[in-house]
Image (spheres, rainbow, N blue to C red):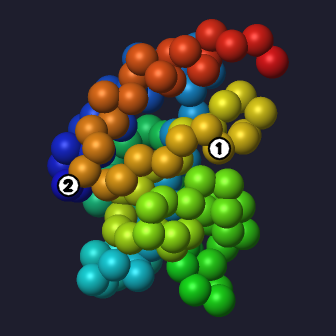
């Protein structure tokens, strides 16, 4: 899922940044140890895909040490199994006020969200 997600997230960023889209990436090593590197390694790795959007420090998204951002997102948009994040590249779409609108599972292609993103970007705050 990594190449497709990064490639399509970069395409969305490039197409919609000027209209106000902000993509926030939070590396997490809670899923099969897929993010073992430090911040410099992660930045180099994502750079290979042309990532120019914000990639934050590695955090936990589940459990007692879950970052407050993910406590907020999962409380606002639980999935059918509950509030926890099941795998990397779970996506949350928020409106311009930061209110979570929808949660998408990792296999959902980022480009498939473009129409909904554009709709939210067109909303008046």
Element type at mark 2: loop
Q: Residue 43, which numbered label?
A: none
Q: Residue at x 18, y 49 (%)?
A: 3
Give the answer, above or below, for where 119 lies relative to 90. Answer: above
Give the answer, above or below, for where 102 lies relative to 66. Answer: above
Residue 96 visible in image: yes
User: Which residue is tagged 1?
Assistant: 100
Q: CA distance from mark 2 to mark 1?
A: 23 Å
Quadrant housing residue 124: top right
Q: Where residue 33 appears, x then y in whole percent?
A: 30, 83
Quadrant housing residue 78: bottom right
Left/right of residue 25 with respect to residue 19 in the rendered view: left
Quadrant housing residue 65: bottom right
Q: Foreground residue, 40 or 27?
A: 27
User: Which residue is tagged 2?
Assistant: 1
Left/right of residue 60 with respect to residue 40 in the rendered view: right
Element type at mark 1: strand
Q: Where residue 40 appears, x then y in whole percent?
A: 43, 68
């Amino acid at each position: 899922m990594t190449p497709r997600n990064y490639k399509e997230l970069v395409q969305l960023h490039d197409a919609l940044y000027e209209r106000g889209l902000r993509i926030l990436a939070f590396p997490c090593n809670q899923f099969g140890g897929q993010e073992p590197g430090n911040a410099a390694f992660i930045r180099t790795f994502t750079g290979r895909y042309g990532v120019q959007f914000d990639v934050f420090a590695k955090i936990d998204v589940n459990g007692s040490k879950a970052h407050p951002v993910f406590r907020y997102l999962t409380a606002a948009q639980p999935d059918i199994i509950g509030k926890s994040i099941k795998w990397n590249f779970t996506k949350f779409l928020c409106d311009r006020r930061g209110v979570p609108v929808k949660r998408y599972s990792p296999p959902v292609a980022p480009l498939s969200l473009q129409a909904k993103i554009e709709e939210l970007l067109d909303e008046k705050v």
